[in-house]
Amino acid sequence: MFLELEHLTMKFGGLVAVDDISFSVNKGEIHGLIGPNGSGKTTIFNMLSGYYKPTSGKIVFEGKNITGLPAHKVTQAGFARTFQNLRLFKSMTVLENVMVSMGHLAKTQLLNVMFNPIAAQKENDLFTEKAMKLLDLLDIRQYAHNLAVSLPYGTQRRVEIARALATEPKILLLDEPAAGLNEVETNELAEILTTIRQSGITIFLVEHDMKLVMGSCHEITVIDYGKKIAEGDCDCVRSDPRVIEAYLGKEEDL
Amino acid sequence: MRELSVLVQTIIGGIGIGSLYALVALSTSMIYRSMGLINFANGSIYMVGTYLGMIWYRGMVMGLQFSYWVSFIIGILLCAGFGVVMERVFRKLADVDLRNMLLGTIGLGFILDNLMIIIFGAEGFAVKSPVSSKPIILGSIRILPQNILLVTVAAILVIALQIFLTKSKTGKAMRASAQDRDIARTMGIHVNQSNAITFAIGFGLSAAAGILAAPIVYVNPAMGSAVGTKAFAGAVLGGLGNIPGAILGGVSFGIIEAISAGYISSQYTKGISFIIVLVVLMFMPSGILGEKQVDKV
Amino acid sequence: MKKNPKTLKLILFSIAGIALLIFPLLAKNSYQVHILNLVGIYMMLSLGLNIAMGYAGQMNLAMGALWAVGAYTAGLLNQRLGLSLWLTLPCAIVAGGLVGGFVGLPALKVRAHYLSIVTIGLNEVINIILVNETKLTGGVDGISKIAKPALFGFKINTEQRYYYLILIAVIATFLISRQILSGRVGRNFRAIRDDYKTAPAMGVNAGFYKLLAFIISGCFAGAAGALYAHLNAYISPDIFEHKTTLFIMTLTMVGGLGNLNGSLIGSFILPVLQEYLRAIQDWQYVVYGLAIMVVVLFVPGGLMQVFTLLKPYVTMLTSRFNKLKSGTTVGEDSNVS
């Protein structure tokens, strides 16, 4: 198994945000996690990326138990994530934002980059070259030297994805990447997701936009009130009575 | 038995000094709560407050001389008025980032300290206590009347403040605007006005602490710096922005100080107190009663 | 056309370089040189603080104490073992870095205003140790008669000669700072400053870089301490109190946080300004406090922000000047603006 969540539970004080959830993500697929607001999606997301330590349960990635590792270790293990509410480094250009993510891959010794100008320059050049390729992939090369936070919303979303990809992940966790995007941008996003998947990166997608989810995902897990209520492919999930009830009850259309 | 009475006496002394720290910590914490501003000039305000009261007691202004308690009231009122004026300056500082806030309030403290030196001179004066300096003896415990006075008056002020905040309309508005400025605004609460009242109270409390301390310390323009840092440490220890926390933190700091001076080493007192604050913060990063911060992403 | 600003820059740099080199010869007395030597030491301290506070966003309010660690390491090694500056300097750098890392440990747990009170406290603790461990540190009397260094028999025993030593040290510190910040380490510092929560998701070990920032500022302070001890020949705890920390912070912020040039400018302007303000006695500190308030309220980015604000006007003026020189009329584009 590629990524496996086993009996994952998260409690905040007395409140159970995620209750005994188990499912697995297959390599090379786009896996969707959906559910009404407040159902525990973001909590699962934060546990996967090392931001929350689960109260109980296990996260197993490529046979290794990564439960409770700090966020930077999780990233080094092959996870990358984006943030729902755009969190780009505000003092940095687009290029610098992307280059930050490459630091943990660096082969040059720390003292060497600190005190040896030649080694540092070489590393910077290498990072720049790699970053520029990613910017090309996301079609934002022309903004490379702009301050990232000064760009329009949709562009910033692309920078976030480029920054996540720069960590060279095996699995990319996207937290509502379509939030705030218009229809054209959402369609472009779907294309980007396909390109990323084709390059061999698994995608784990938390999303509200059902069109995007149904159009892109191979496998979907549905949760409500912190519990798993359904899983399967799009058709299977769409016709599941419990899913319909969960969404109808909250007046959101599928 | 003897050892126990020494310990009790040490703790009582600590509570006395601690209630001074608590009053200044309360001021720091209330101002932080109302506008998110860390006031590193709180020590200077404590010193200014002391002068604003003691100049009347000593008859330093146009020969006017009042009793200790009248001077106490005048000092608090003047310093509260000073707070209302200063709120306008601090309002600007509340909008800058922490590092600039730090520097700005330090700069302000610098100006106040040196203005006082220019006006009153660098050398200070001693103040006669309004109560007897003969210790009260209870069994084997000796308590200074000034100490009892300190704790009593501080307690009265804290209770009065609590009643004001929870019962009066203005107090409720202040608490509302401290919790959420935007919501308070839509509820028709005048945020600036309620901040001004917070400053008046905060500055008044600092003045009260200074005037109460005057008979046991030497009044001079440098008297505020140590108290300011300790009160800030007390406020942080209890949990910044938390009113019971400020009192708890301030009093605890006083007790810790007294115990470490009496039992461990008088030279290392200040150091030990800070180390204890550090250790507490390592386990409770938001202080004892501070709200636990959840890492939201 | 593009060549012009570059040659201009080169000319300005050469003028500044020559001015720096011949300053001791022009100075009226060795006191003036002494002030400039202190300015150089402040520059090193301020660069260290700027890396921790300006770039990595860590409230290191123990710079005075870290400076003391360097000074006392050098002073004691010289007094007890007779080591010269060339040996005490590296020891002081290591000691400063070690204590800097120790002071930074709480940053793994607490942050912002909580971290500031903790580091203020540690500054106090270190100072109290200096005052009370009389047997080791000499207590309030401090350490005196620290020897001036010599280089191959050439004694660096005057303010003028020491000036060049400090000049080299400042240039080295500046270049090292720039080097450290230009690459991966600098980007990671800014990442944890800009958003300490998201940085780990990009693989940045936030705790490690927080500590590294403290260690670097400690090393710089250590170097500054050794240079100061051998320059002054006398050190005592009161030089390194909390107020010194605040002074270092003030010069850094007045110059401009997050900008290395800001550290140089702030460290030059404030101590020199203080010398001139001596004439107005007690009022000097009031003026000084007012200056801080003006900076904080109106130019929170420090003096470097003033320069950035002025930059467009300067470029405009130079481009007009260039156009005049190359024969085109200014009127051509005047309707644009």
Image (spheres, rainbow, N blue to C red):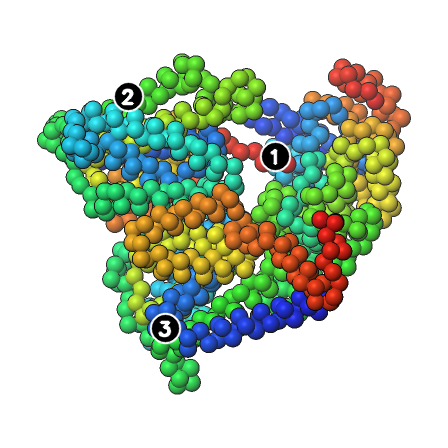
Packing grade of label 2 (10 A; few <14, some 14-19, many >=20) is few
Observer-nearest of C238 and C70: C238
> For residue B251, what is the image quadrant?
top left
Disc 1 sits on a residue from what chain? B
Q: Alpha carbon of mark 1 to alpha carbon of mark 2: how far?
A: 40 Å
Q: Alpha carbon of mark 3 to alpha carbon of mark 2: how far?
A: 63 Å
- Helix, strand or loop under label 3: loop
Circles 1 and 3, Cβ within 8 Å, touching? The answer is no
Please state which of the two labelled residues, at mark 3 or mark 2, is closer to the viewer.
3
Where residue A32 appears, as percent x and y from the top left, is 80, 33
Disc 2 sits on a residue from what chain? B
Q: In the rendered view, tell whether residue A34 sits above or below residue C307.
A: above
Where residue B97 appears, as percent x and y from the top left, is 52, 41
Where residue C244 appears, as percent x and y from the top left, is 37, 54
Q: Alpha carbon of mark 1 to alpha carbon of mark 3: how far?
A: 60 Å
Marks 1 & 2 on one chain: yes
- Helix, strand or loop under label 2: helix
Where does label 1 land, which residue? B296
- Residue at point 49%, 59% (across, down): C265
Where does label 2 land, which residue? B156
Observer-nearest of B121 and A98: B121
Where residue C296 appears, as percent x and y from the top left, is 48, 45
- Residue at point 39%, 28% (across, down): B84
Q: Is residue B12 in sight in this rendering?
A: no
Circles 1 and 2, Cβ within 8 Å, touching? The answer is no
On-image quarter of the N terminus of chain A: top right
**Three-letter amino acid code at the position of disc 3:** Lys
**Three-letter amino acid code at the position of disc 2:** Ile
Where does label 3 land, which residue? C28
- Residue at point 66%, 50% (across, down): A92
Q: In the rendered view, tell whether residue C49 sits above or below residue C73.
A: above
